Image (spheres, rainbow, N blue to C red):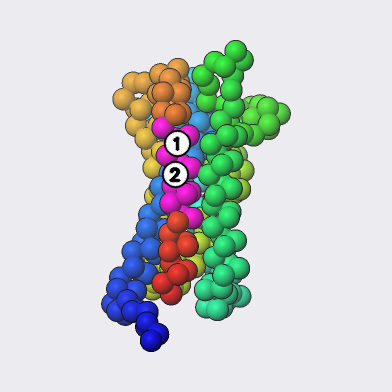
Amino acid sequence: MAILEKQPPTWYNESMSIFASLGIIVLAIAIQGFLQLSPNLFAIFYHHALGKTSPKKADDRSLSFILGVELFAALAFLLVYFITSFFITEESFSSNIFIWAMTGIFVAEAIFFFFCYYKLGKNNKKTTKLFISRHLAESLVYRAEHAKNRSSTILLGVTTSAIEILFTLPLLIISSVEILRFDSRFGFLFIIVYVIGATAPLFAVRILYRTGHNLAEILRIRVKRKTFFRIVVPLCYLGLAALTLLGGTIR
């Protein structure tokens, strides 16, 4: 006598699907907020702005840098979201190829971040050096030190965000897919929340400067948190991989 497999009720699948979608979106925002290139360069930029101008002008200039990060985050998300909505079908979202491809990408991101995102200093000295080449890092620092007007400062914010597209593009793709599956009416709301997540670390650095901290103190804080970011971000990527698989099995 054949034993029939008992299928879970529809409400259970719907609940788990919503849970997976919201979990993916929350983890994507968290990862975006934990990336370190923009906050590190912003701290250097603010330090030199304070040395060249008054605190009030430096504070105003810092908002231009933050605006650059906001612009890139918003425009990149909008571009990926509209490409996803117009050119990828529901069948593509639910295909095993898409699910396993995104899962593999998130696992690879977790491994790369853990082993390669931070670089060791000389004699294993703790530093905040990141995955980019020394030539690129020196170029960014030079531009941060010599940014003189609003347009160059905005461009600097855009550039630093663009460099980390390797880590953020998969987040934008899976988030766009989940918004379209969940409820596309909330798309612009999520974009706003995502942009807030991208700029929150910059506002944190800005607050530190405004409360009397200097660059050396801020960098020490970031060095102390290096281990936290190095562990938590890969765990978030692995969480995305698990939720992507979960979402694919219940839809």
Vertical order, 144 against 234 (above or below): above
For the residue pair 20 and 131, the one nearer the viewer reads as 20
Near-viewer residue (246 or 135):
246
User: x%, y% of residue 240?
Assistant: 46, 54
Describe residue 178's horizontal placement relative to residue 143 as left or right. Answer: left
**Residues at marks 2 and 1 touching, judged by CB atoms closer than 8 Å:** yes
Residue 90 placed where, x, y %? 52, 78
Q: Amino acid at mark 2?
A: Leu
Q: Residue 103's spot in the image, x, y percent?
A: 54, 57
Q: Look at 58% across and 54% down and name the residue there.
A: 105
Residue 177 x %, y %: 49, 68
Q: Is residue 53 above or below residue 228?
A: above
Q: Quadrant of the N terminus?
A: bottom left
In the rendered image, residue 50 lying in the magenta stretch gets the answer: no
* Region rendered in magenta: 228-241
Q: Toward the viewer: 92 or 214?
A: 92
Q: How packed is label 1: few (under 14 Cα within 10 Å), some, or many (20 or more)?
A: few
Residue 224 falls in image quadrant: top left
Q: Is residue 38 left or right of residue 162?
A: left
Return the residue at label 2. Answer: 235
Say if the magenta span includes residue 236: yes
Q: Quadrant of residue 22?
A: bottom left
Q: Is residue 234 visible?
A: yes
User: Height in image: 206 above or below 168?
Assistant: above
In the image, what residue occupies the spot 33% across and 64% down?
19
The circle drawn on residue 231 is 1
- Toward the right, the furthest residue is 135
